[in-house]
Each structure stands twice: as structure tokens, then as C-alpha cells.
Image: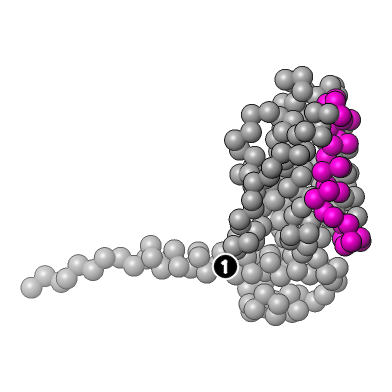
Amino acid sequence: MPDTIRPSTDGATASRTERRKARTRASLVRAGQQLIAQGRTSVAILEITQLADVGMGSFYNHFESKEELFDAAVDDALERHGALMDELTADLEDAAEAFAQSFRLTGRLHRAYPELSKVLISTGARLVTSKRGLTPRALRDIARGVETRRFTMIDPEIALVLAGGSALALGQLLHDHPERDDATTTDETTEALLRTFGLTAEEAAEICSRPLPEVTVSLDGSAA
């Protein structure tokens, strides 16, 4: 009798291997984010792998150094933040409202997700020139606002510098002063930026009084 032809399992095995590698890398990135938020970036690699609950050898399968891991951890946080803001502002046609809603939600996320907020703040001035995360998306909305004459500032990059610096300072202010109301503080900051960009005080206040969508998924992908 002819031999029974058995389906190849090579594809399934490769798929399982890739998923396992992805989980390991995600665990290391998450550990890196926790350490950045705690200000503990001088720890040994062994401590990182213990926090991630992976073997020491697994670290070097994904990263050559701690610095590379921490860069990846920041990059991941930036991109998750930007993707979330894109999702929550996707249906807004007005560039001014899209910018304002993204900024208002970001301000509230400093309190809702303090750990990842501290990762974002840790980027410092690099946040303003980053090619990942919220920065290119904010520049897109600002440029669209200039093109449609919603904003009177001529240079979108200068407007981005003002917005990026304000976002970082706002996050630090909310962490340093937990007694402050994050919604009120964020909305007042957003109003000031909109006025600087060329909107009237009345229109800026009206835009910042509009209801915000509910954030139902956290930046790490778990239910809020």
C-alpha cells in the first residue's frame, strides 16, 4: 500500500515560533517601559529579563544592548499613542477640532496611563522631531489647518514646537501636582494653543467644550 501522505507541519511550527518570539519581544519591551517610567535605566540586563520573565539568552535574540531595548520601548509607546489618537479622531474633518481633540485626549491620558505617560515624557525634546507616534500626526493636522486657513500660523513646524513643548510640560505638571484637575488644565492649555494658532477665544473655548470619545482600550492593548 502507498505511504499515507501527511500534511506538512513546517508552516504551523514556524508560525508558533514567530508568535513565541513576538511574545518574548513584547515582554522585554514592556519591561523596558516599566523601568523607564520608574527612572531605572541603569539596571543590569539580568534584571530586565527577570522582570520580563524570559531567559537571559532571549534578550540577545532581540536586542544588542539595553540602549536598543529602551529605544524600542519608547518607540513602541509613541506609536501606540499615535495610533490610538488616529483612531479616536478619524471621523473629524475640521483640522482644528482634530488637533484639539487629540491634544485634549493626550492630556487626560497622562493621568489615565501614568506609566506610559512617563515613558512619553522621558523622550524630552526628541518628541517634537520624532518620526513616530503623535508628532507626525499632529504636524499633519496642523499643516491641514494652515492649508484650509483654520490656522493663521504660517510655519506648521513652529506650531508643532509649541504644541510638543506644551504637551510635555503639561504632562509633567499633572504628575507633579496631582491636586490639579487634569481635564480643566488640559482644556485650558488646548484653548491657549488654538488661540495662538489663530482661532478666536470664543471658537477655541467652544471647540474645547465639545464632548470627547470614551477611551475603551489602553495603550498596552488591554481593556480600560
Give the residue drawn at x 72%, y 26%: 144
Q: Is residue 183 magenta?
A: yes
Q: Is residue 49 visible?
A: yes
Q: Is residue 29 above or below residue 104?
A: below
Q: Indicate the position of residue 51 as horizontal and vertical percent values.
A: 71, 77
**Tag 1 secondary structure:** helix
Residue wearing tag 1: 23
- Quarter-wise, where is residue 43 in the image? bottom right
**Magenta: main secondary structure:** helix
Q: Is residue 57 visible?
A: no
Q: Crowding near pointer 1: few (<14 within 10 Å), some, many (20+)? A: few
- The range drawn in magenta is 174-201
Give the residue drawn at x 68%, y 66%: 30
Give the residue drawn at x 72%, y 33%: 97
Q: Indicate the position of residue 126 as horizontal and vertical percent values.
A: 84, 47
What is the quadrant of the C terminus in the image? bottom right
Q: Is residue 146 above or below residue 106?
A: above
Colour setting:
one colour
Q: Is residue 94 magenta?
A: no
